[in-house]
Image (spheres, rainbow, N blue to C red):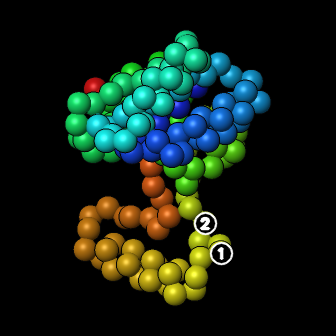
Amino acid sequence: MKLSVVVPCYNEEEVIGRFDEEIRQVLGELAVEYELCYVDDGSSDGTLHRIRTLAQRYRPTTRYLSFSRNFGKESAMLAGLKEATGDAVILMDADLQHPPRLIEKMLDLYQLGHDQVIAKRSRDGDAPLRSVCSRLYYRAINKWVDVELTDGVGDFRLLSRTAVDALVS
């Protein structure tokens, strides 16, 4: 099995090295072939230079795309999904808000037949006021929109090849 990890980046110069070390450590412990695909979304700092250096050092398991300007995170994620060649694709941020150690659990769920595995942020440790405000916000928003938005759900997810192909078609 091959796993692709798509990482949209915008001005991540300060954290990209640490992220790369952590993700490689986690992926190296898994029994999967993997590729990392960084997508620089028009960063104005040294992010692109660092990504190029990583791609040269770790070729062929690391590739990158670079936008001429900032097109937004969703565009970067879509470009990465189109570039990914894995049987499953992880979308995650470079700022380490998405813990790489959760990838193993996500893969376990994928191997049970799930086309999409979505990580949900735990509110444990949040200030009580923040938790209450967040719950109230999502409750109010869900009264006004046609789809249910879930508190704590972001971009950190695993998609099967079938799901990726459906998204990019």
Secondary structure of the residue carrying numbered label 2: loop
How far from the left and from the top, in percent, is residue 110? 61, 36
**Quadrant of the rendered structure where residue 8 is?**
top left
The residue pinned by badge 1 equals 125
Mark 1 Cα shell of 10 Å, populated few (<14), some (14-19), many (≥20):
few
How far from the left and from the top, in percent, is residue 55? 51, 20
Quadrant containing the C terminus is: top left
Q: Residue type at mark 1?
A: Gly
Query: What residue appears at the point 67 percent right and 39 percent down from the top-left corner?
Result: 22
The answer to whether residue 92 is visible is no
Q: What numbered label is drawn on residue 122?
A: 2
How far from the left and from the top, in percent, is residue 51? 47, 29
Image check: 36 left or right of 18?
left
Q: What numbered label is drawn on residue 19?
A: none
Contact check, label 2 and label 1, Cβ < 8 Å: yes
Query: What residue appears at the point 68 percent right and 22 percent down from the top-left corner?
Result: 32
* Residue with the most extreme bottom position: 129
Q: How many marks?
A: 2
**Quadrant of the rendered structure where residue 133 is?**
bottom left
Compared with 45, 134 (above or below) is below
Q: Residue type at mark 2?
A: Ser
**Quadrant of the rendered structure where residue 61 is?**
top right
Compared with 29, 157 (above or below) is below
Compared with 152, 77 (above or below) is above
Image check: 98 left or right of 69?
right
Pick the residue in front: 17 or 126: 17
Pick the residue in front: 143 or 43: 43
